[in-house]
């Protein structure tokens, strides 16, 4: 594959599953995950919320969808309507883009381990090169082999042993994951969105793990940039993967958003 190659974008509806009744909440997973990765959080929230679980572009049953972050925001709007939107890592980039583009649809915003981009143009270019290298690695190695190395990173230290969640990740396709890196990686946030953060008008909770120093620092910057509607919650004794390591904390954060008027009627 030639350097700089970008497959054409394919814009179709995202796969989603809905559960429960109550205020509407849309959950968007991270890179290499599927909507099944939200199971512990969804099991909790479905008792009193309408939970919408979405397979992000290039993942799960949305594997054939090719979409950049702006296009993904539009697809999420179609899938979720007006709701509280919660995104983890890659999913956090997606719901933040939606909050900037369609504030009328975002009743509340949850950002978990997510940045607003890389300030330095040299750093953005380096990240795009790194993501391209990862994309080629996935295409060369296949998903199962790639996941072994990906999940062994210090970033994911302390992940619970959940065979079902690992099996769900393994159902992803090399082509889908590679396209996600190329179209929706952090390096594609060019220019970065830090200066746009004051436009976020929805009540916002930023969640990070206490052992995740990098994203906790970024979380403080997100809260400072968004301003009054935003609050930071640092979950002790967990790392980057807060939804997997501390699902009750995520569910509590969502309930704080819907209780404060950030909910939307079921639809």
Image: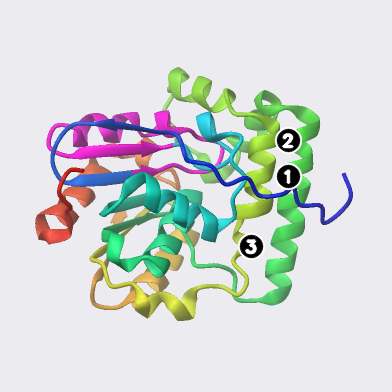
Q: Position of residue 254 (x, y in %)?
A: 22, 49
Task: Quadrant for the N terminus, please.
Answer: top right
To which residue does mark 2 refer?
A: 138
* Mark 1 surroundings within 10 Å by alpha-carbon count, few (fewer than 14), some (14 through 19), many (20 or more): some
- Quick check: 70 above or below 15? below
Q: Would residue 109 be found to the left or right of residue 256 on screen?
A: right
Q: Quadrant of residue 69?
A: bottom right
Q: Is residue 32 magenta?
A: yes
Number of the front mark, 1 or 3: 3
Q: Would residue 180 be found to the left or right of residue 236 on screen?
A: right
What's the magenta region?
A: 27-54
* Mark 3 surroundings within 10 Å by alpha-carbon count, few (fewer than 14), some (14 through 19), many (20 or more): many
Q: Quadrant of residue 32?
A: top right
| Residue 42 seen anywhere in this rendered image of the structure | yes
The Cα–Cα distance between marks 1 and 3, rounded to whole angstroms, is 15 Å
Q: Position of residue 252 (x, y in %)?
A: 19, 46
Q: Would residue 72 be found to the left or right of residue 160 on screen?
A: right
- Count of numbered circles on the image: 3
Q: Could you say whether the residue bearing mark 1 is in a helix, strand or loop?
A: helix
The Cα–Cα distance between marks 2 and 1, rounded to whole angstroms, is 6 Å
Q: Could you say whether the residue bearing mark 3 is in a helix, strand or loop?
A: helix
Q: Position of residue 28 (x, y in %)?
A: 41, 44
To which residue does mark 1 refer?
A: 134
Q: Is residue 244 magenta?
A: no
x 10%, y 54%: residue: 259
Mark closest to the chain's N terminus, 3 or 2 = 2
Q: Could you say whether the residue bearing mark 2 is in a helix, strand or loop?
A: helix
Q: Would residue 26 be found to the left or right of residue 188 on screen?
A: left
x 50%, y 39%: residue: 157
To which residue does mark 3 refer?
A: 188
Task: Quadrant for the C terminus, please.
Answer: top left
């Amino acid at each position: 594959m030639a350097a700089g190659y970008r497959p054409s974008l394919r814009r179709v509806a995202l796969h989603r599953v809905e559960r429960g009744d109550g205020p509407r909440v849309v959950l968007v997973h991270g890179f290499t995950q599927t909507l099944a990765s939200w199971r512990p959080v969804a099991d909790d929230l479905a008792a009193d919320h309408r939970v919408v679980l979405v397979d992000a572009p290039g993942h799960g049953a949305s594997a054939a969808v090719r979409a950049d972050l702006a296009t993904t925001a539009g697809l999420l709007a179609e899938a979720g309507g007006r709701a509280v939107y919660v995104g983890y890592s890659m999913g956090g980039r997606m719901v933040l883009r939606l909050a900037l583009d369609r504030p009328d649809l975002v009743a509340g915003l949850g950002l978990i381990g997510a940045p607003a981009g890389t300030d330095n143009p040299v750093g953005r270019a380096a990240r795009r090169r790194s993501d391209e290298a990862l994309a080629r690695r996935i295409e060369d190695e296949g998903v199962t082999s790639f996941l072994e190395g990906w999940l062994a990173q210090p970033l994911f230290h302390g992940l619970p042993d959940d065979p079902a969640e690992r099996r769900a990740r393994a159902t992803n396709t090399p082509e889908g994951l590679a396209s996600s890196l190329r179209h929706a990686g952090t390096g594609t946030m060019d220019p970065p969105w830090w200066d746009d953060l004051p436009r976020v008008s929805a009540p916002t909770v930023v969640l990070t793990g206490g052992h995740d120093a990098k994203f906790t620092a970024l979380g403080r910057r997100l809260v400072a940039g968004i301003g009054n509607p935003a609050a930071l919650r640092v979950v002790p004794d967990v790392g980057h993967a807060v939804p997997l390591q501390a699902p009750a904390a995520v569910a509590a954060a969502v309930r704080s958003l819907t209780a404060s008027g950030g909910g939307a009627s079921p639809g």
